[in-house]
Every structure is written in C-alpha cells, then in structure tokens.
Amino acid sequence: MDGKRYTGQLVFGLDIGTRSIVGTVGYKSGDQFVVAAQRVKEHETRAMLDGQIHDIQKVGDTIRYVKEQLEAAVGRKLSEVCIAAAGRVLKTVTTHVEYPFTGDKEVDQEDIYGLISAGVEKAYQEFLEEKEEDEIKFYCVGHSVVRYYLNGYPMGNLEGHKARIIGVDLIATFLPDDVVDGLYKAVELAGLSVSSLTLEPIAAIQLAIPERFRMLNIALLDVGAGTSDISITNDGCILAYGMIPVAGDALTEEIARHCLVDFATAEQIKRDAGEMETISYMDIMLLPQTITSEEVKKITANLVEDMAIQAADKIKELNGDKPVSAVFVVGGGGKIPGYTEAIADKLGIARQRVALRGEEVMQQIVFEEDIKKDSLLVTPIGICLNFYEQSNNFIFVSFNDSRIKIYDNNKLNVADAAMQVQFPNDGLFPKRGKELNFTVNGKQRMARGQLGEAAVITINGQTADIHSPIHANDIIKVIESTAGEKAKMTVGDLSETTENLTVLVNEKKIEVPRFACVNGVLQSKYYEIQEGDSIEILNYYTVGQIIAFMDVVLDPHMNLYVNHMLADRDTPVYENFSVSWTFGQAQRMDADVGDMEEADEIEDAYIEPADMEETKDEVKQEYVKDKESGSARGENVPGEESAGESEADKKSIQVIVNHSPITLSGKDRYIYVDVFDAIDIDLSRPRGKGIVTTLNGRRAQYMEPIAQGDVIEVYWRS
C-alpha cells in the first residue's frame, strides 16, 4: 500500500492482551475514525497472565511481528504507539482542583489542559500521601474528568465560556511500577516508543459508551482473558473504575482440565462452543475426542456463576452499593454463553439490559479492510481514540547514568528528574558551612556558615539549571553542590562591640574599645568565638585598664580620681565618666557648695580601733540628749525607731562602700555610723594603726546624714 495516500497523522494503537496482541492503525476524518489496518497475533506461549507480562522478550517479539505486518499494510514505518494497561492491582484517587483568573477570561483549550494537568498532579500527591511507606511504587496511568465547574457551578464544557474561576472533579488511576515497566520494555524491544498510555477501561469507554449515553447510570464490563475491567457512568460523567482478577482464562483452564488438553486447544474448544453444536479435538494422549457446546456450558457453569457474582458485586460497590440501570459488555470473555444473563440476575435487573456491545457502538468507525465489527474490537479502537483525548505519557531520561521513567505533564524540568531518583534536595542548592552557636549577654546567637558552590548541571552536554526543561532521552548530569566554610566570628564582629566607650581622662576625651568576658575570662575584640561560648559585653573599664590602654606609667604615690572622687585601679569607669590622677593636693567637687578641700584631711579621717565602739556609743547618747532637750533634729537614735514613725515613712538607699554597693533599709533617714551595721569589719581585732573613714572623698563625720549613691570608704590604715 502506498504510504503517500495518508496525508494526515496515523495513530498506532496496541491492545496487549493476555491471549493476543491486537494492533490498529488509523486516522481521523471529520467525525469518523478510519481504521486503515488491523492485525492480530496470539501469544505462542502463556507469556502474559492476568493482564501482566511474564515473558517480556516473547511479548516484545509478538509486538514486533504485529508492527511489521501493519507497516507492510500502510506503507509507513511506525515508531510511536499508544498502549493501555489492564486494571490489575488498580487504585484510583478522586480529587478536585480549581484555577482562578485575575478577572473574567474566555476559557480556551490551554486553560482546560492546564486545569486537568493540575488535577492529575494533585491526585498523584494525594495518592503518595495515602500509600504505605514501604509499598511498591505506583504510576498514574490514566485519568478521567468527572465534572467541570464554571465559577463554582457544574458545567459540561468550559471552552468558550467567560470565567473568573474554573474547576474540575477528576479520577486518576494508578498501577504498580512493575506492570507499567513491563509494558514499556516490551514495546521498546519491538523498536517502538510510547506516545500515550491509558487504562483499558478508559480506552474501552471511549467507544462503548458515547457521551450522549453517559447521563445514564451504566456499567461497562470489559471481559478479557486475565481480568475484567469495569467503569461506571452517570450524570454525563465517568464516576469510577475497578477490576476483578478473573476472566476468560479461568474458563479455558477448567475446559483444559476436563478435556485433558493443553491451554491452546482448550481455548479453541471454548471459542468453537459459541458457534458449533459439536466440537472435535485431540487430547494429550493423541486420541480424537468430541464434546457438545451444551457439555462445555455445563463444565463452565459454576465458574460463569462465580465470575458473574464477582462482577455484579464490584459494579454495585463502585456504584454506591446499588445496581446500575444497564451493563454494556465488551471483550472476548464476554461472549461466554450464559454470562450476560447471569450478570443481570445477580444485579437484579432485566436480562435485556445486559448486552454485548460491538457493531452498535461503531457507527462512526470506518474500516478500509474487510473486518467484522464485534465486541473484540472495542478496546483496540478505543486505545487509538484515547490518543486524541489525552496524551499523558511517561518519558525516559538518563540521570547521572541511571535510566529513569517520569510521568510527563509537558512541564518537566531537571528538578522533577532529581526528585524522581531521590537526589538530595540540598545537593542541588549551595550548602552553607557549619553554623556557630553562642550567647551574648544571655541571649542565643547564631552565625551562619558561608555558602558553597551551586550544583553543576548539564543536559546533553549543555550548561543548564534546575529549572531547565527536559525531554525524552535527555542525558542529565548533576555534580552535587558543595558546602561553604564554617562560620567564623570574632568578638569585634559583634554589633555590641562596634561602638567604643568614651571617657574623659585628665580633661581629654578618649575612646576605648569594649571588652568582652568570654566564659568568665576577659578577651579582646580579636578573640575568635567558639561553639557554645558564653559572652558578656562589659559596659565599663577599670581605672587600671584605662591606664594600660593609654600605655602610661604612673608614680605609685599618685592619687586616682573617678568623677572627682578618690578611686583606685579597680574602680569601674562607665560611659562619659571622668578619670584623673595627680600628685600632692587632691581636689574634689563638693556636692553642696563645690568648694575645694585639702587632700591631707583624709589623713586625719581615722580613729584608734579601741575607741571605735566607744565612739559609736557616744554618738547614740548625743542623739538621746538632743531628743530629751527638744533640740533633736527629727532624726532617730541609731538602731531605734520613733514612736510615731509609720512603716510607709521607711525607705531604702544604696551607697557604695569600699567599691561595692550596700543597701541600707528599715529607716526613714540614715547617718554615717549606720554603715558599720551593714559591713563586715571586726573592730575587736585590729589590723592596722587605725580606721580610715571617708564620705565622697573627704573625711567623714559619724553623725552626718548619708544619701542615695554616696561613696564611702572604711578601711584599716597601715
């Protein structure tokens, strides 16, 4: 046949069945589908069982034979093929997805395709979430639209309508990886690539139940050799898919056991029983035998009954536990005498509502060859018609020398392939080096490591990235991303140390860097922080640290002052404090009048240890006399409370005694000698020539008042 006569696209469909392989080549002409050629070849051995390939090589050889026969018939080389999988271990997911537009938009085919693709992807994700962790891998092998929605309302066809939001209810079907892989491998052995993959009941329903009938509650029962596939329609939609793992082969095996023949001879007896009264055959002892069609019917009666029960139960289960209004039966197994009647009886519907469908549903099918239209042709032609409905497919690519199969949604990229092989996600993106954890002033801090290099990706030798699209047979190479350097940080990198401390030294303003105490040890800004370090940023310097920072050497006889008060090298110096050091005459700023006193007054500010307790008693007695004579200044005798003093009048103050804060409480006012009750100094055990007592850098009077923040010195003079 001259291939030039076919000006349009030829569609090649293969029905890879348990008993035979049917190849169909055709094309669309207006509303009709023209079958240009069809060839059938039975398996020479039982290379397939229950719809699954067991001997891939033998099935591949049979497919090649059918392909070559068709190529000779149409005068063209065939390279792509549409196939369908039986519903063995079939699982389904029903989902709903919506797609909003920014405003009113006229819906076109691209919008509908995108909506369906989103529905398939969502169904696949839902399926993955529901299946067990260790369950074998499943693939989506087909889908059907249950119902479209336009702005939230059901709609038969979205195209051409203006919409703000479109939606779809969709059924997606899934089969195990080994079923799909076997089909693809057998097809490849025949020199073909898969252009579309669907499920056999989806393919059969394309032809057996036209859309005008889908408003009725009808079941399609495709009885093959190994499985019986079922689909249900109602309200214009396909509602459900299912299968039962029993079909014509079970009857053939029963005939083989009864007649003592091989499987092929038993299959021939089964077929002839539907057309002849008496069938002749040769048993395995090479003895000629005969059997009537009535005997065959009796032999298989129990199995037919069991098949009908299983089919009827499954139909009711898929239809919400109720019978359908009618059943269309297709496939060779459905020709078994008494099968349709048994289905009707088990469903409880009239027998005339269960019937074989063949020529009745092929009004729009034209055969260029002399082929009888019957129920055997429904699925093979439906596979071809399904090509025009959906092009869901799997493609093969090479990922780092591993051949992988991916569901093709026409939007595949490198990231999809990486996900399929479980390539580590962080291997695609630059990785950070090890982080550094520590605390600053009691608060948790974390420094991030440096970013490494991104993954190096090529497709067919060309530079690419994770978003680059991929196609069938692409060779993808991915060199995993690298990790950057671990986090490094010094004390000087902390924001708390960026601002220096400003102090006034001998009337000159200087800035000193802030110190940090790390794990209890003083560190400079150059200290490199380690994992788990506890850092306290100090907000002061000591006088000695300032002297060291300025790199000066002071005479040991110099007097040190902080804020014009006598200090030593351990005295803390905070922001904007003044520091000075002088010889001889010391100066101070009097809090009341600001006049200057001689520093040598400090030399007289001590008392002999033996006189200290006596002095304290004299002070108390003096207060008592003042009180009795009416000349008291309203102050209480030390250690006593006024009779009229209320708890509300009492208050606390804090003073600095020998560079440490001391809190005095329980009185409404305080005098200098109150300090002796709050400090640890043993007057009964002298440790020097006398006690030095100063208040704010000058000699103190024991009875003079003291106030919040006063600086007091009490120590033994050597």
Image (spheres, rainbow, N blue to C red):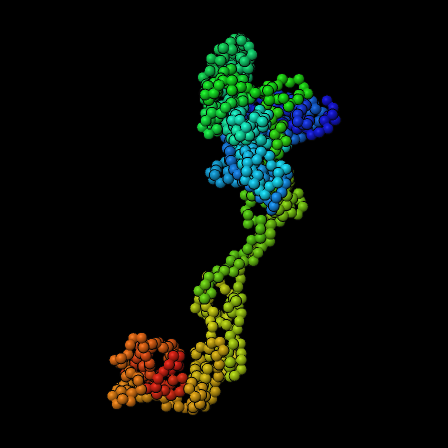
| Residue 15 seen in the current view | no
Residue drawn at the location 51% of the way across and 33% of the way down: 92
| In this view, 350 is above or below 419 | above
Q: Is residue 692 left or right of residue 32?
A: left
> Residue 709 falls in which quadrant of the image?
bottom left
Location of the C terminus by quadrant is: bottom left
Rendered residue at 52%/40% (across/down): 125
Q: Position of residue 420 (x, y in %)?
A: 56, 41
Residue 610 to residue 573: above or below: below
Q: Residue at x 53, y 71 (%)?
A: 499
Residue 416 or residue 322, whichever sits in front: 322
**Number of marks in picture:** 0
Residue 496 in sight in this render: yes
Which residue occupies the foreground of this view, 553 or 498? 498
Name the residue rendered at 44%, 88% in the picture.
594
What is the x, y in percent for residue 433? 54, 56
The x and y percentages for residue 685 are: 29, 83
Q: Nearer the viewer, residue 384 or 554?
A: 384
Q: In the image, is 664 to the left or to the right of 275?
A: left
Q: On screen, 563 above or below 71?
A: below
